[in-house]
Amino acid sequence: MVFERDGYLDAKLSDITVSAGVSSGTFYTYFPSKEAIFTAVITDVINRMFAAAAVPPDVPGPGPQRIEYATRSYLRAYAEHAGLLAILEQVSTFNPAFREMRRTIRHSFRTRTENGIRKLQEQGRVDTELSPRCTAEALTSMVSNFCYASHVLEREAYDEDEAVRTLTTLWVRGIGLGAEAVWTTSTSTDRGTSQ
Amino acid sequence: MVFERDGYLDAKLSDITVSAGVSSGTFYTYFPSKEAIFTAVITDVINRMFAAAAVPPDVPGPGPQRIEYATRSYLRAYAEHAGLLAILEQVSTFNPAFREMRRTIRHSFRTRTENGIRKLQEQGRVDTELSPRCTAEALTSMVSNFCYASHVLEREAYDEDEAVRTLTTLWVRGIGLGAEAVWTTSTSTDRGTSQ
Amino acid sequence: MVFERDGYLDAKLSDITVSAGVSSGTFYTYFPSKEAIFTAVITDVINRMFAAAAVPPDVPGPGPQRIEYATRSYLRAYAEHAGLLAILEQVSTFNPAFREMRRTIRHSFRTRTENGIRKLQEQGRVDTELSPRCTAEALTSMVSNFCYASHVLEREAYDEDEAVRTLTTLWVRGIGLGAEAVWTTSTSTDRGTSQ
Amino acid sequence: MVFERDGYLDAKLSDITVSAGVSSGTFYTYFPSKEAIFTAVITDVINRMFAAAAVPPDVPGPGPQRIEYATRSYLRAYAEHAGLLAILEQVSTFNPAFREMRRTIRHSFRTRTENGIRKLQEQGRVDTELSPRCTAEALTSMVSNFCYASHVLEREAYDEDEAVRTLTTLWVRGIGLGAEAVWTTSTSTDRGTSQ
DNA sequence: TATGAATGAGGATTCATTCAT
DNA sequence: GATGAATGAATCCTCATTCAT
């Protein structure tokens, strides 16, 4: 995938068509523009992200177990698609349409977190001092940017278990759920292939 | 500042010179290239960031008080320079030299955090289960990306006090320092101008 | 041909494309740069020069007859391509790659001359006092610069027969071959078109 | 001298002023343009060339001795000023004023040669078959381009004595003066310093 | 539907020259 | 006379997109 290799800006349409084995003319019968094919590619990635990061209803929550599950799912999904997500990051810095996409992803995860916290507050398991919205913003930042830093910026990823443990611990304790047991299953409970 | 308004990519040299009230020739008496002037501008911003985000030695630490101080400083420094930091984010997605700059900033803050955690572990005030390095990565992500999200991505900043309180709480509790008193001074202890 | 009219330095790419009836974009489908198209053009000229200045094996030599033949061939070939050869002269004064080309042409003719002299010395037809190398350098200079002077510098060419007779006489007598009969066929024995 | 080092095209006025230790403003109180200073420099060189290449009236001629003297003088004068003469060669390929200068030098030497030949023909020492004008053109080419080739193009100069002997022999024999004794004084009769 | 040759707008940069001080 | 900061015209090249075949 040319976008992954060169980034959006440095990806030449000619590279894309050559790599796809079609002529530039043919390209335009399928996509109206360079932006359009990137939209298609990145939309697919985002859908996979959402699918992979979804937490099944049978995972008990909203507590430590569900938080851990969600964190691990997100980390795996990000790792899986880090290449193109990095490009979305690039494009969203200069293209409003993709910035909007970027925001949508973030909203989705932030809202899930926000709802979780709200539920925990309603259940009286965490205090109501923290604003669910602001807290969700912070926790979303922590997890998503942890992925960006390790996969894109530094390019030396952490061990998945260590990352999950660290992030979950910070998250759970941070919102005040620390007293509840966290590590019933200490490490990498594999949930099928990570693909 | 043209970069702030248009981003690096869309900033035309002619816009820069017109906005500076000089001819293109004059521009090149002072800067050898578009990249060079951005380097100068962003280097200055980074220096101001570091200065503004520095925590004076007399702030007691490494504990909740120092963490809160550092968080508030960072938030203020970011808010102050959000416009250009957003552009650095853009440029670092396609220019290796600026990506390195971006990394350097991150390293600096991450290392400070890492050292703080290590000290707290040595003092026996937080458990040693969490890796200082990985934890610092996560907390750095939380704070820095919180700023990016609120100032650049969403453009609807949170109230400084709420943000500081939320981030500090998550941080302090997250590393297991929750038992120690946090809110001696509940809100915005102004430390003079943030300049 | 724009190069011929304006020289390399004053040839604007836009002139070239306009004169070729194509857009600037089209130009770059065929040549990667201004230098590249000049390379193509001048390489072609050089090849034609070599072809036209070649002396067929059946021309008896290495004596007056072959010397005359070679001289006439060179003069015709130069006249044919004087316009572009003048530009090569210009470019070779500031561009190392083309200076090398210029040297190569010279080497080729000088070596041919050097070998001819050496053979004549071996046959005992000319004395061995003169260094073949230095003599070849001088004779190459005489013929090539005679062409440059008359076609480029002065722009008033000599009559071909007069030029051939003069140069051949100076050459043949100069190396000490004067006693042998020179002018069996006194003038312009046409050898077909000079193309 | 900046022109000698960089050529006319690559010589920046700023280099010239820096090397002269004056400001660009001051430069323009002495020379109206870059072309003007080169004119001054090259005019001086040409004058020195003429002075150095002049043949004193007491050198016996127009025969072998005078031809040898003139050749040696020319070679020395050229060697002395090869650097700037090469630049004149460059400039004359695109600037009509300097091309005219270049022509003037050539004319001067060609005319001297032409007159010498005419005199020898009048004296019956050489045949009248060769056109003095065309012959002078050829011999001027031989000597001048020999210098250009060895000093500028190839940058591996021949030994002065060998060059003088070769060129003089070719010249003398070439015009048909071969029967007369040439080498009364076999080598480098030093005529004072070559400076 | 596939092709790929042709398009052309758009922008960073150089350096001889000027002129207010 | 000396300075040197300011000038600005002039040009090569890229690459997403088109459209006749």
Image (cartoon, coloured by chain):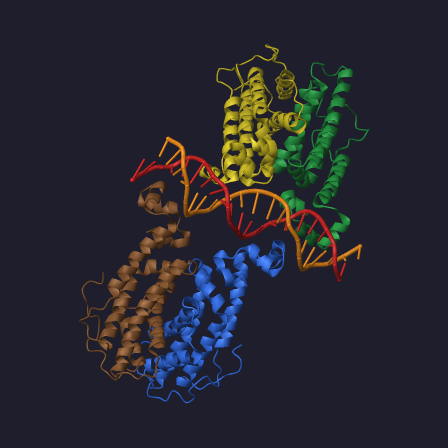
Chain colours: A green, B yellow, C blue, D brown, E orange, F red
Q: Position of residue F19 (x, y in %)?
A: 74, 54
- Position of residue D89 relative to residue A93, above or below, is below
Q: In which quarter of the image is residue C94?
A: bottom left
Instruction: Name the image quarter holding the C terminus of chain D.
Output: bottom left
Residue found at the far right of this picture: A58
Q: Nearer the viewer, residue A113 or D47?
A: D47
Count of residue discs: 0
The residue nearer to you, when weighing C71 against A187, is: C71
Residue B99 visible? The answer is: no
> Which residue sits at x=32%, y=56%?
D42
Quick check: D141 left or right of A191?
Answer: left
Q: In this view, does C22 lie to the left or right of D191?
A: right
Q: Provide residue A81's location: percent of width, then percent of height.
A: 69, 40
Residue A89 is situated, as x and y percent measured from the top left of the image, at 65, 36
> In this rendering, does residue A37 appear at all?
yes
Side of C58 where D177 appears, left or right: left
Give residue C68's quadrant in the image: bottom left
Q: Nearer the viewer, residue A35 or D148?
A: D148
Compared with residue C73, is residue D92 higher up or lower down, i.e. above or below?
above
Image position, residue C79 (x, y; %) = 47, 73
Describe residue B193's horizontal placement relative to residue B139 as left or right.
Answer: left
